[in-house]
Image (tube, rainbow, N blue to C red):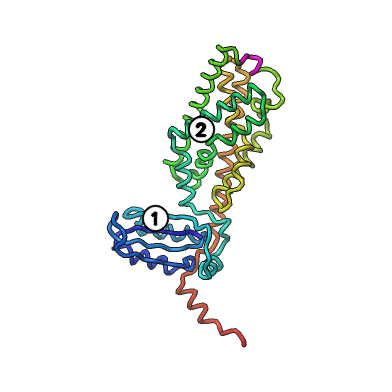
Amino acid sequence: MLRLTATIPSHLTEQVTRVLSDSSAVSTLSVLRGAAVRPVGDVVQADVAREGANVLVDRLRELGVHEDGTLQIEPVTTWVSRTGFEAEEETPGSSADAVVWAQVAQRSYDDSELNWTYLSFMSLATLIAGVAIVLDSQILVIGAMVLGPEFGAIAALGVALVRRRTLLLAVAARALVVGFLVAIVVTCLAGLVGRALGWVTLDDITGTRPATGFIYSPDKWSFIVAVLAAAAGVLSLTSAKVGGLSGVFISVTTIPAAGNVGLGLAFGAWDEVRGSGLQLVLNIVGMALAGWLTLALQQAVWSRVPAPRSHSRLSRRIHAEPPPPR
């Protein structure tokens, strides 16, 4: 169940209320007249079955709610309501499978914003990956994978392609390119410092590394794992269940590959740079393609799900049926 709140000028209230009250996906509806100060107007709240949210959001956008006011969508984690249960039963589809595109797009923009926090996490994760490579530690590699924030921007590429949002595509691409460049440069500088202090040697980078050798040895399985992990990650982001994201972070080697590139540059180990650079590209391309295909499939499937029926049509059908035998 979702809580939909529209803060709108008064001249839109009647139209918004009509759209919401006519949908069988809406279980409760409230109008707080004169409650809005900016914009001056009313606040309309509705509890909506998750699987019926997209149709309502599209209709409210057609009315210009997002231009003249604000439309907020929040999950209702716990609710006890017979009308809410009936709304979910009457609305085609499953709430766990439903993709609320407004939420997905908003999260994509948030995860792709190029800011100090994003660059800090990218740099810190890549530095930890660099230490993991020097120590040949799988535990530290996993920690670096979990810490890296890059998956949100990679998933945003798929969202931008499916929803045809060129601005989001540019924002996500910039976050990935700048983020990895900054992280690699920081790790390279740290490698130069470690080299000058004698803490890190060329043999640490180019020697036998049984626990972390996969970072600079890309193959078909690297691409396959990236595709499968990204598909699972996108499903977690778009559905009501988000338990699979940690496994996605641990499955891909983007951050460790970037760390190895940085160290390879610091020591002039060009074989390491080439191998890890290819690993990085394979993972990003595989994840972006998988995210795009997964979202495209979800959009195609949901486009064939019938829209929620209006209360007026539902009422006519109920009254037209003969009463059950006693």
Left or right: where 276 falls relative to 21: right
Q: Residue 204 colored magenta?
A: yes
Q: Which quadrant holds residue 265?
A: top right
- Is 113 inside the magenta-drawn segment? no
Q: Which residue is mark 1?
A: 71
20 lies left or right of 139: left
Compared with residue 270, is residue 49 higher up or lower down, i.e. above or below?
A: below
Q: Which residues are magenta?
A: 200-205
Residue bearing the label numbered 2: 121
Dot 1 alpha-carbon crowd within 10 angstroms: few under 14, some 14 to 19, many 20 or more: many
Residue 18 position within the rendered picture, expressed as x and y whole percent measured from the top left: 38, 68
Q: Nearer the viewer, residue 259 or 316?
A: 259
Q: Nearer the viewer, mark 1 or mark 2?
A: 2
Cα distance in 3D space between marks 1 and 2: 31 Å
The answer to whether 9 is drawn above or below residue 236 in the figure is below
**Prevailing secondary structure class for the magenta stretch in the rendered image:** helix
